[in-house]
Image (tube, rainbow, N blue to C red):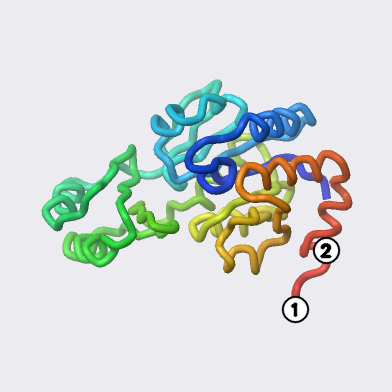
Amino acid sequence: MRIDALAFDYDGTLAHQGRVDPATVAALRRAKASGRKLLMVTGRELPQLHEVFADTAVFDAIVAENGALLWRPEIGERLLGVPPPPGFVEALEQAGVWPMSVGRSIVATLRFHEPKVAAVIAALGLDWRIILNNESLMCLPAGVDKASGLAAALDALGLDAHRVLGAGDAENDLAFLEACGVFAAVANALPDLKAVADIVTEGEDGAGIVWLIDQLLDDPDALIADSRQATPAT
């Protein structure tokens, strides 16, 4: 199988404590120099991502806001979701949901607020869903997640999902990783994610991505052959 593109989560996958090591950026550049496309699929809002990561332009496409926004360096932003409904943010504030971050579409807070957020969504009769990610909670329109965002990015770039190698670390990554031809979990990923991954890296977060890219560039056939895609678990 030819891998034409790599799709990575940001926090806990590319980044450690919000920052990407120079060695990881160098590995990304090696992957891009090989002729492969690079995609990021993150729950972060785009302005925040640009603040903490200066090398966003190395990516051919970035799916931000957990699938609600697509950004390409040469084109700019395209909203894939819809803005928060009128009254939603105010109702969350009145319910005591804080801290809270509001993006172009995403509304994010902490996981322990889930009962309050669910009650507000139900009271307003909204067709929105809650997506959990470690200690974070994200609200998005129904049908918007990392898988839908990845699909939009691949369509824009003319890529086949079966020729994509994805990597992530948390439960909200599973949607887009299952759409990839091969998916990897970094060594620090949640146990449930590692249990179903095709590949588990020999290193945590960015170091795991460096290992994965080096394996792909050194011997792509061996990497794919050694994955569970070649010998499905029973």
Amino acid type for the residue under numbered disc 1: Thr
- Give coordinates of residue 154: x percent, y percent: 61, 41
Residue 128 occupies which quadrant of the picture? bottom left
- Give coordinates of residue 167: x percent, y percent: 63, 50
Residue farthest to the top, as pictured: 74
Q: Residue at x 51, y 40 (%)?
A: 63
Give the residue number, with chain letter if any, for mark 2: 230
Residue 216 appears in the rendering: yes
> How crowded is the residue under tag 2: few (<14 C-alpha within 10 Å), some, or many (20+)?
few
Which element is circle 2 on? loop
Amino acid type for the residue under numbered disc 2: Ala
- In screen coordinates, is 75 left or right of 88? right
Which element is circle 1 on? loop
- In screen coordinates, is 1 left or right of 160? right
* Residue 234 numbered tag: 1
- Which one is in front, 187 or 131? 187
Distance between the alpha carbons at the discs numbered 2 and 1: 12 Å
Residue 14 occupies which quadrant of the picture? top right
> Which quadrant, please, contains the C terminus?
bottom right
Q: Residue at x 69, y 46 (%)?
A: 160
Vertical side of 107 occupied by 39: above or below: above
Looking at the rendered structure, the number of numbered marks drawn on it comes to 2
Q: Residue at x 84, y 59 (%)?
A: 226
- Which one is in front, 19 or 37? 19
